[in-house]
Image (tube, grey):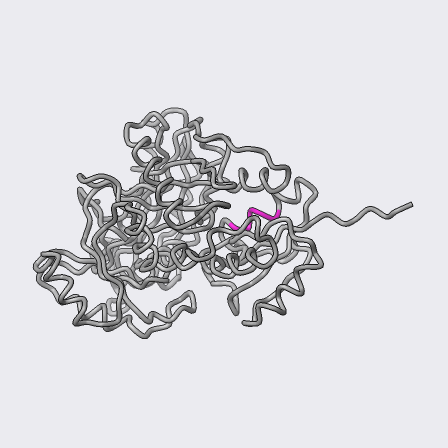
Amino acid sequence: MTAPSSPQVAVIVDPFSSGAQYAPQFASFGIPSVAVSSLPEVPAAYADSWDAARYRQLLAFDGDLEKLVAQLRPLSPRCVLAGAESGVELTDRLTERLLPEQANTPQLSAARRDKGAMAQALRAAGVPTIRQICTDDRAAVQAWIEREGLAGRDLVVKPPKSGSTDGVTRVPAGTDWRVPFDAQLGRVNQWHNLNDRMMVQEYARGTEFVVDTFSHRGRHTVADICRYSKIDNGEQMAVYDSLTWVSPDDPAVPALTRYAEAVLDAVGLRHGAAHIEIMLTDEGPRLIEINSRPHGGGHPAFNLTATGDSQLHRAVRWFAREETAPKGYRLLRHMTVVFLIARSSGTVSGAAVLDGIKELASYHRSAVKLQDGDRLEVTRDLLGTLTLGFAVLAHPDPAQVERDVAAVRAMEAAVVITPDDSPGGSADDSPGAAPVAAAPDHAAR
């Protein structure tokens, strides 16, 4: 009698944040997972999502691709998936070697990670983009600004291979774009990538959306569309304020869907999950960036409540049993994620007021990490946001969700942050984690 063969494994590269949800979902189909790490350590903001016990085997990439391929090949992988942004490039390289029939277009691999190459791919495909340049040459940037008629206009400076809004800086009209450009050029960012070039973009105005997709064999499906609110927080222009699920009947959905599909085709993404950030401007949709991995922050689990499905669950069903995903989605419950914001640096007191979030009628989940005595920095990017926490609100009545969003902000405003240079500060002169009013438009990140 022949012994049954062991099941094929799912290989998850950097299974952090939402990528941590892959392993238990594959396990529900009897498929074990193997974790591959492309980073020397798990980023601190994602440590809570890392659980080594979920994986049959743990492997680390040390720069030797052939060695890693040799370790994985005997395990008969059925798929190689990126869990977090840091794993996108290694996922491409491993898929090409181990499962070429599942590989995304190899010659466009850079366009799925590097924002400069991303913009070039869209232009080559005739997909409208935000005006931008990616270079290490200050003279080239200045010539581009003059040629495009952007002198005296707001600009955005950011690294081409960062993530979580790291290094995204708004340059108001009249200020020198060279300051953030020079400050970040040559720096190794928090994702261990060298900022060998910088991107300079026009400041695009409009409403920002995210389209979360799953693709298989070049067939694209939309699992959800959400509307972002990001605000200025001092010099930082990409601080998360809220995320709200959009009804599939919203008039913006068809245009966003068509544009997202064009972006996926332009960057050669034929297989897997993608997180596509789009600014809907007066001229039409314009890409902010595409991330070739699931929406982070635990989004797939929240989306399961809001819509009954998610891009990650679609991916698992496809790679487990080739179940075809629906083209669109439905909205079962209105849902908003409220992100906490620190407007000043200092020491926290009165954090217990945030316990009231769990008593709200629309409370679904919260991840509030703030405690008395914590030392906070002004919120600058997504990792800073995750250090503070967020609340997920869901209810059949959208008005109830709106009321509870306001209640969260009221609790947040009651937290005290005492500045280091003012030991006797009080809630009156040092409002803690207080939100700022959202501007009527938002910038491209």
Q: Is residue 127 left or right of residue 294?
A: left
List x then y, in percent, for residue 35: 60, 58
Q: Residue at x 32, y 75 (%)?
A: 186
Placement of 280 over or under 57, stated as above or below: above
List x then y, in percent, for residue 326: 49, 30
Q: Residue at x 57, y 49 (%)?
A: 101
List x then y, in percent, for residue 20: 55, 51
For the N terminus, the quadrant is: top right
Q: Is residue 22 magenta?
A: yes
- Judge by depth and name the residue closer to the eye, 18 or 201: 201
Q: Is residue 70 magenta?
A: no
Placement of 212 over or under 79, stated as above or below: above
- Judge by depth and name the residue closer to the eye, 353 or 61: 61
Q: Residue at x 66, y 60 (%)?
A: 72
Q: Is residue 272 left or right of residue 400?
A: right
Q: Tell me the magenta residue range.
A: 19-23
Q: Is residue 203 left or right of residue 105?
A: left
